Amino acid sequence: MKGIVVKPGLAGASFEDIEEESGNGRVLVKTLYTGVCGTDREIVAGKLGITRAERDGRLVLGHEALGKVVDPGNSSFSEGDIVVPMVRRPGSCANCLAGRQDYCTDGDFTEAGIRGKDGFMRESFYEEERFLVKAGSEEVGIEKVLTEPMKNVMKIRESIFGVIGRGLWDSVKGRGAWVFGTGTEGLLIGSVLSSIGMRVMLVNRHGLPEIQQGLAERIGAEFFNSSSKDWASGKKRVPMDMVVDAAGAPSILLDAVGNIGHTGIIVLFGTGGAGMEGKLLGDTILSLVDKNLTVIGCEDGAREHYEQAVDFISENGAKYGLGKLVTGIFSPSSIEVLSAKQQGEVKSVIKW
Ligand SMILES: [Zn+2]
């Protein structure tokens, strides 16, 4: 069997023969597609410090996957079921033991394709039933490969509903949500917030490419170029009641605190800002306090969020054109896609 292997801490990846596993009653899954994301590219560049091998200093890459059950083993799955494997595996803290490893308190977990557990960029893999989420039977659209990034958005949605009472919001309907970052996560966040009745403003620092424009039209979102700094005219079009940062630059948090309305909610999801600097002034803290703002840090998601992601994509994938976010399909030997963003890319995927 072949797979894509990295050596944590070292740059590079290779498509090579890897050892076959034994099933021990687990489900055998044939990989259909794996998504490529920024985390994969940081690992391949040797820059993601949290990367850990499963054994022998080597790690099979890949954490966004869609597969087909070829042997259900001792599980309740059927041959032909389409499944999405979960990324994070529980450690031993109370939250992990309760199935909420997304809220792990001691860091004693593993993540497939990232830290301490082989991932899914290989022809097939064995998996425990409890870490597989059913995404359909026999045939599903390619947009289901977005289930893993979408599960993060379902936890963001849950987090928002968990705090709106604090600011005495009667509802999220009609409220304005500014989503910073127009990559895959930003667009998925925009589609979900639109579906719950929010007015969505997609934001980046350059301009909205054609694919993103198509999705913006389908979800009824507006677009704001943040390099204009003309916040006032943007807020006339869509009020800034909520900010979701899917990019991670510290300047976004500072812009958000400065421009968001009273009782606003700021969700920090982006992680791309490591090493960047932003200036935290006492005025920023004063605004946080004075406006009664709520800031939420949010990462990963639990099994229920994967299930909600499958349902959301089934119900809204065609309406919002989510399949169009897959802008390139590559063969497993085209490992150059793991090194650099492709021209016009929203989501590149590898077909196995
Ligand atoms: Zn834990």
Image: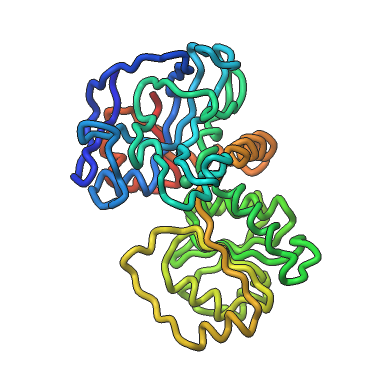
Return the x and y of residue 268 as percentages of the image width and height: 52, 62
Report whether 21 appears left or right of 78. left
Left or right of 199 in this view: 349: left
How many numbered circles are shown? Answer: 0
- Depicted 253 relative to depicted 93: above or below: below
Q: Which residue is drawn at 37% across and 49% down?
A: 38
- How far across and how far down the image is residue 243, in percent? 59, 66
Residue 272 appears in the figure? yes
Image coords of residue 219 (percent x, y): 66, 51
The C terminus: image quadrant: top left
Residue 180, above or below 97: below
Which residue is nearer to you in this view: 158 or 181? 158
Q: Where is residue 146 in the image (x, y as percent from the top left)?
A: 52, 39
Q: In the picture, which quadrant includes the N terminus?
A: top left
Residue 317 seen in this snapshot: no
Q: Is residue 119 above or below residue 263?
A: above
| Residue found 68% across the figure and 72% down from its top | 239
| Residue 228 located left or right of residue 231 | left
The residue sitting at the right extreme is 170
Residue at figure coordinates x 59%, y 26% from the top left:
134
Residue 60 vs residue 76, the one in the foreground = 76
Display coloring: rainbow
Q: Residue 119's image quarter?
A: top left
Q: In which quarter of the image is residue 291?
A: bottom right
